[in-house]
Image: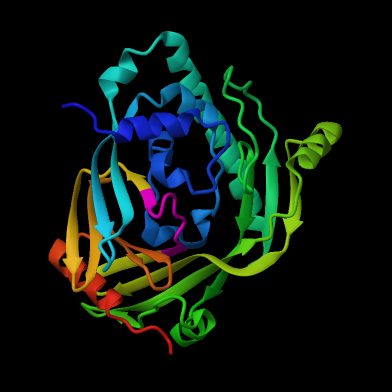
Amino acid sequence: MEPNNTDKWLEDMFRETVVPPVDVKERVMGAVQRKESNMEAVKVKRKAGFFLVIGLLVTTSSVYAAWHSIQLKNEKGEVVYELYQMTDDKDVKESLPSEIKERIKQEEAETERAMNIVNSYFDTMKPGTAAAIYVVPKLPPVEGAEVKYAEGHAPYFTVLSKPLVFEKWQEVREKLGNTVKVPAELAGGLTFREADVSYEAKKDFDPEVLKKEAEAAQKEFVVKELEITGKLDEIFFSYAGQKGKVSALVTQAVRINGKITVGSEYEKAEKLTLGKTQAAYEEVEREDGKVRRSISWVDDGTNMVYRLNTSSKDISKAEFIKMVESYINTELLK
């Protein structure tokens, strides 16, 4: 099977010397971080804004190929969302030179080390606060893989925003107003349980200053507190009932050439038409044997991306689709 033009797109992206101002983690972090989190249980511990280790992506970009894609269009017929299947080509990985295999292992370990530091600091933050964190690297960069700082994200830098937590549906609905749909209940009797609302941080810091501060103090990491803006970053909702749990993740749409591009290691996927809305259905078997189902769509009017997830064994595909339909049909607060 010959790869499509997506391969070229990925190669071009990996050769860039500037990190694109998008959540690149959604495209490729699954290849770096094998243990996928259960969205129903993650909530606050999702840790917004993990940084990207560019060296790993540069050395292994040919290992992870995109073979299949699904495009979603709006009512005007414009492509607004593109989902790529990222495949881990084990044969290609095994054929890599031993020094590259070793580099991959080192960078996976370095990524885990730095992420643990970021996560530990995130746990100490108060709800509704934000910070920039720089983790001092221990692994020398790959030759020729220098990456410049851009849009608040760079290797070993990340911007964290601790969400506000709401347990009452009415409170979060009033807080979000007419920007995000917040159903009180989904089809099948699943009711609202909790919401975590994160706002973007004001990225008014100089990464070079943080680097020099860390070097001068010989610290493992340094932090600068940031102000919160009024712009929504992401919202996590959880719903539960007798049949199980469903989570919803809502984010601001970040578009390149007019569309959102996402990568996933799904095993099954298809395009759904739910009323006037096109949606992408994904299915993958997790390491614990459970099947995780996800459905994503774009609300063009509010420029928000919605993604519902469930790993509950008692919720069938058909039932899950009905839950998503009930979510889509929810009215915004007037």
Seen at 30% across and 18% down, the residue is 92
On the question of residue 243 being in view, the answer is no
Does 26 appear above or below 101? below
Task: State how the image is colored.
Answer: rainbow
Q: Residue 231 location, x and y as percent?
A: 58, 68
Q: Residue 196 location, x and y as percent?
A: 51, 69
Quadrant into which the N terminus falls: top left
> In the displayed structure, does residue 318 sit left or right of residue 141?
left
The total of numbered circles placed on residues is 0
Seen at 29% across and 75% down, the residue is 327
| Residue closest to the eye, 59 or 21 | 21
Q: Residue 46 location, x and y as percent?
A: 49, 55
Q: Residue 68 location, x and y as percent?
A: 22, 40
Does 160 appear above or below 301? above
Q: Which residues are magenta?
A: 250-261
Does 190 appear above or below 263? below
| Residue closest to the eye, 327 or 313 | 327
The answer to which quarter of the image holds residue 237 is bottom left
